[in-house]
Image: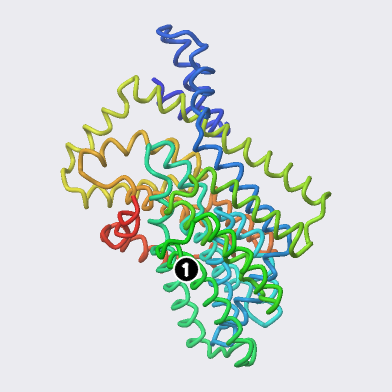
Amino acid sequence: MLKIFFLIFMGAGIPVAIAMAGASLVYILFSGSLPPFVVIHRMVSGIDSFPLLAVPFFILAGNLMNNAGITTRIYNFALALVGWLKGGLGHVNVVGSVIFAGMSGTAIADAAGLGTIEIRAMKEHGYSSEFAVGVTAASATLGPIIPPSLPFVIYGMMANVSIGSLFLAGLLPGLMLALLMMLTVAYFAHKNKWGGDIHFSGSRFGKALVELAVVAGWPLALWGLIQAGAPPQLTVFLGLVALFVLDKIFSFEAVLPIMTPVLLIGGMTTGLFTPTEGAIAACVWAMVLGFAWYRTLKFRMFVKVCLDTVETTATVLFIVAAASIFGWMLTATGVTAGIAEWVLGLTQEAWVFLLLANLLMLFVGCFLEPTAAITILVPILLPITQKLGIDPVHFGLVMVLNLMIGLLHPPMGMVLFVLARVAKLSVERTTMAILPWLVPLLVSLGIITYFPKAVLWLPKMFY
């Protein structure tokens, strides 16, 4: 009966969060087995979680980076690095998204922030609107795969899985996705005989490589000093001071913004802070860059960013709260156990279940936004993965990638609608533009699904 109430509410066009909470309340009222107050109690306890504090802070960090002019710096850095290749701005789009993914944690922030700059630039250089929208949509899916990631935080909380492990598990798949997208850009460039969009400049390219070397060498140098016996906290502090001094001397384009994911992952893997504390550190870093260093963030803008963050956070946490009571009711009424028995009756093979789960999640992702889909699917699918011996970190990565692909589809794909508005294209033309880019995404999904060892070796080194 609970499922029937939920489907009726969804069919009536009621928002998914209200449909979940409403179906639970109506079921309790009809059954009379529990007091209605249980709904409120479970919803409040569902968001009374320390790991969930990471959600508003990661949202705030992404919004601060997006509004402090840092997206322009990322774009210019990516342009210097790969803009001279054939189909240059397509490669710039992907590389820029990889960098911005390490700050925003959401696909929509990537599409709306960096995507606006990229689509305008690509159209000015003669690329079709369809190609610009397609590569921007595909690269936006990197946002929640490369850490930090809001969907990973929600999944980790729902599945009781280490968020740090999920973050590390997303690194290599995110880079693989980026590589496949760049190969797709190269294919279109060869097919259409496109050249580079800027002339190759040895000094400009060399400076970009130096910046990459600084980003890669800085944590290795600190690690070496700490291993040699230097005090960790003092070493990190002096390392940060040295980083700012180098940035002042050489006027780096994007070293400090790119350092955001390095600081987050480094802090979490060394135990310096938890993912929640890392989200706060990301906000502090963004404010230091915006207010003090680049001085592109003003107080009036900061207030607006905070209000936008409150609005987004309220939406996300209301979905989590509603899903908490709904998931609890599904378990209490035996729905999850019944589904598990039915699926296990069909197959005992992990690879068959993963295939069926992928098809289900791709379908669900077309109709529900990722937070709602995760909170509904985790209580249903996770017990099956446990019985089949599938690693929950691996399954979390598979789930998030499926739901990111769903963001590109009608009827509910948010990235689809954001980019249609940015590019001033109809939803139908935007959908057709995105279709070729599903190939690298689905190839990546297949690799990630059936080669878990390639994904899990990095988190297992630290967790």
Residue at horizontal 41 percent and vertical 48 percent from the top: 363
Nearest to the observer: residue 296 or residue 357: 296
Name the spot of residue 272 as percent of width and height, x first: 48, 49
Residue at 34% x, 59% y: name it.
Answer: 458
In this picture, is 5 found above or below 84? above
Number of callouts in the render?
Answer: 1
Q: Residue at x 30, y 22 (%)?
A: 334
Relative to 126, say whether 271 is above or below.
Answer: above
* Amino acid type at image mark 1: Trp
Tell me: residue 222, above or below residue 304: below
- Which of the 4 quarters of the picture holds residue 95? bottom right
Q: Residues within 10 Å of mark 1 (few under 14, many from 20)?
A: many
Q: Residue at x 37, y 64 (%)?
A: 444
SS at mark 1 in the image: helix
Judge left or right: residue 316 versus residue 161.
Answer: right
Scheme of image coloration = rainbow
Residue 190 placed where, x, y %? 48, 88
Residue 161: quarter of image = top left
Image quadrant in which the N terminus is located: top left
Residue 132 pos. (x, y %): 60, 72
Q: Position of residue 351 (x, y in %)?
A: 22, 52
Along the line of sight, the residue nearer the viewer: 340 or 56:
56
Q: Is residue 423 left or right of residue 300?
A: left
Q: Is residue 369 left or right of residue 198?
A: left
Tell me the quarter of the picture where residue 289 sits: bottom right
Residue hosting label 1: 437
